[in-house]
Image (cartoon, coloured by chain):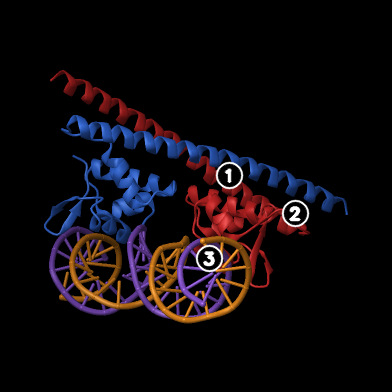
Chain colours: A blue, B red, C orange, D purple
Amino acid sequence: MIVYSISDLSREFNITTRTIRHYEDIGLLFPQRQGKTRLYDSSDRSRLRLILRGKRLGLSLEESREIIDMYQPGKSNVKQLKKLIDAINSQKKKLNQKLTDITNLMNDLKKAEVKCLEALKLNGEN
Amino acid sequence: MIVYSISDLSREFNITTRTIRHYEDIGLLFPQRQGKTRLYDSSDRSRLRLILRGKRLGLSLEESREIIDMYQPGKSNVKQLKKLIDAINSQKKKLNQKLTDITNLMNDLKKAEVKCLEALKLNGEN
DNA sequence: TTCGACTATTACCTTTACGTAAACGTATTC
DNA sequence: GAATACGTTTACGTAAAGGTAATAGTCGAA
């Protein structure tokens, strides 16, 4: 079984060990221990990757936690499953909003770039 | 000319007036005043819309400011224009990363939903 | 054996983005 | 003329997400 030290992960994902420990403090990660030393396996690593992806998208750590928890329905009853499906669809809606926002922002930036390039052209002619 | 009161905008965008004043405190908005009362015009409203879009995408207010500033090249010199174009392209890269992240997250959620629906089916048969 | 590179914990500090409360002015309406 | 609904400023509070010591244990190489 592959294991990672805390600094392995901090190097790989370019974050500090403090950050990783913080995620453990708030219950987002729960690595094994060898004595006092944390040992991360590939599932811990995946969780971390998901957290960081969430961060890039502007999710709070709590939101990331909720989403990650969606990936293991566990032995839920029907009611819980339905709630989970609702939550999933709600997240999907938010993501669609983000897609729209990004598309629009991207277009704005393209226009801004064109304006810049034109201004550059004019300046070049002076 | 159309003008908006602070509570007009707070209602329209579903934020508090405190938030709007905060954006002014940090120099993101600069409405006209009638005496002490703030009067927002459509350009203030657009800026606010851009700020909120940025927020949905997880941008900090400072990042939004930088991006919004990209929309008015002003009377920049060549050097500044080139820097601006670099900045624009840098932002576009980040946005592309976000697009990838969203696509992946969306796929994860779809898989999670399928798992839920299957679990629901099984439970229904019990 | 001591140095450097790890690891750990505890604890206070900082930044961002507002919330919240106090205290007050202005205007309309009952 | 008191209430209601706006608006204002000042100022302290707070939650989230780490940063930054300080202090100390462990381990392999020189």
The residues bearing labels 1 and 2 have C-alpha atoms spaced at a distance of: 35 Å
Q: Answer with left or right where residue C28 lies relative to residue A81.
A: right
Q: Which of marks 3 and 2 is nearer the N terminus?
A: 2
The residue shown at (78%, 46%) is: A118
- The relative height of residue B25 versus residue B70 in the rendered view (above or below) is below
Earlier-in-chain disc, 1 versus 2: 2
Separation of disc 3 and disc 2 at Cα? Answer: 25 Å
Chain letter for the residue marked with disc 3 in the picture: B
* Disc on res. B92: 1
Which of the 4 quarters of the picture holds residue B83?
bottom right
Q: What residue type is labelled 2?
A: Met
Q: Residue A120 carries which label?
A: none
Whichever of callouts 1 and 3 sits on the residue coming sooner in the sequence is: 3
The reply to whether residue B100 is in sight is yes
Image quadrant containing the N terminus of chain B: bottom right
x 57%, y 48%: residue? B91
User: Which quadrant of the figure has residue A44?
Assistant: top left
Residue A73 appears in the figure:
no
